[in-house]
Image (tube, grey):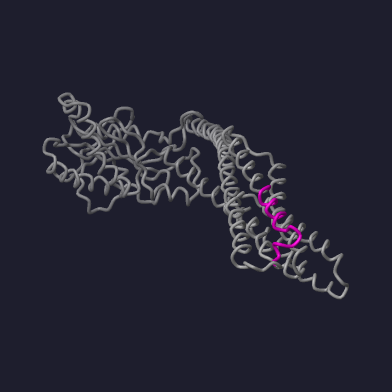
Amino acid sequence: MTEKPSFRIFNEDFRSKHREHHKRFFHSFQNRFKKEFNENFNLEILKSERLRSVLILLVLVFIVILILLNKFYFMKGNSDDVMGKGDILFKISLTLGFFFLYECIVISLLYHFYKKKKTLPYPARLMNAGAEVLLPSLIIYFFSGGMEIRDALNSPPTYGYFIFIILSTLRLDFFLSVYTGFMVALQYSIILYTIKQSMPVATEYDFLMYYEKALIYILAGFFAGMVGYQTKKIILKTLDLVEEKNEITKIFGAHVSPEVVNKLLESNLSLDSETKYVCILFLDIRNFTRFSESRSPEEVVRYLNLVFNFMIEKINQNNGIINKFLGDGFMAVFGAPLGDGKECRNAIQAVKEIFKELKQFNLEYPQFKTKIGVGIHSGEAVTGNIGSELRKEYTIIGDVVNTASRLEQLNKKFESEIILSESVKNKLESEEDFHSLGEIEIRGKVQPMKIFTIPGEPA
């Protein structure tokens, strides 16, 4: 009785220290991961920016094709077409040539930064966003000198603004998209103001419609920014979920079922140390040493994979997890990290299904005729992540683990297949075919234990 309070104090102190260590480890891991992710993500955005510039080059080529069709096909023989007035064609051609060269330089610059694994400075990205939308602005301004003002303000370049706003989503930056929409509206408004000075007063009211159009450009930039922001948010959230899932799988091993991983994610369960009621199952392959001595390592590994394959499947299907592999056996736990109140029943059901599959296995592979022994015990244990920042493992600590291992070893003495403790028997229905093996002294325990056996599927 005098030892219980001190053990309780030690246990609480251990759990408190481990919880703090786990938090420090998690935050350290999270910060390193976020830093590495941000670096790689920014590099991917550079690739996205290059794609955007390539698409702009294609737009420029498309504009040139339209101009040529307009000049030499649709308006052939019309000397008064707009392209022939005031050297407008020359000005537009010069502008297109300049922007084509500009985008080539931008693409080269982005490729250079990508190769150096550096991100493009934000002021440079702002300057580029504002400079690119100058193209439709200049073309609209040139048009205004050779056609009706209304026609110039409703010409195709005014809709070309939307191409640049839409392409801004590839930057995955909310502010840059809003900035692009604002720069489009500003440049369009400047053109309106410049043209308005030469218009009669009677027609000034017409310009209200075009200023409203400028507001639409700002809204378009805002919505493009929202699309880019939400896309980036979804990518980050999905990546966080995948990383969390990978971390859980890494902690519990590659043989944790997807269902268990999904339940852990849904429950948002802490993996700090805590006391839980669990049922521990130890399984051992009989005469494995003699078997492996007469076979090659490759054949031994193939055999273990064949046997463990269906055993692990049955453990997973009954809400258990494989906590440790022990060469020729394993330790499974039911009730941690998640419990359903049926830990002992799940363990017994898993064992019965394993013996049933084992019978079929021995029929299919007579050269690998296999016998196993199983020990099952239940009780409270300390569960949680144990280890350092370099290596952590989800561990079950307590007398229940040692006792289950000792019960499995007693199968050799009693020539049985399954031995379970009284605590497990008391959790099961009375119709089970229990056979008492009496009270047995278990190594490491002061008081003798009542143990029982139930038949497995005959092999």
Q: Residue furthest top?
A: 293
Q: Is residue 247 above or below residue 62?
A: above
Horizontal and vertical percent position of residue 221: 68, 58
Horizontal and vertical percent position of residue 309: 26, 41
Q: On the rendered structure, is 255 left or right of 370?
A: right
Horizontal and vertical percent position of residue 385: 47, 35
Q: On the rendered structure, is 265 left or right of 354?
A: right
Residue at 64% of width from left, 68% of height from top? 77
Q: Nearer the viewer, residue 176 or 382?
A: 176
From the image, which quarter does the C terminus lie in? top left
Task: Verify whether residue 433 appears in magenta.
Answer: no
Q: On the rendered structure, is 268 left or right of 86?
A: left
Q: Which quadrant of the structure image shows residue 216?
A: bottom right
Q: Is residue 30 above or below residue 346?
A: above
Q: Residue furthest right?
A: 201
Horizontal and vertical percent position of residue 275: 46, 40
Task: Verify whether residue 85 appears in magenta.
Answer: yes
Q: Is residue 417 above or below residue 426?
A: above
Q: Nearer the viewer, residue 452 or 360?
A: 360
Bounds of the magenta segment: 81-98
Q: On the rendered structure, is 407 left or right of 92?
A: left
What secondary structure predominates along the stretch shown in magenta?
Answer: helix
Residue at 50% of width from left, 39% of height from top? 272
Q: Nearer the viewer, residue 184 or 394?
A: 184
Taking the image as drawn, is residue 86 in sight? Answer: yes
Residue at 71% of width from left, 49% of height from top? 131
Taking the image as drawn, is residue 1 in sight? Answer: no
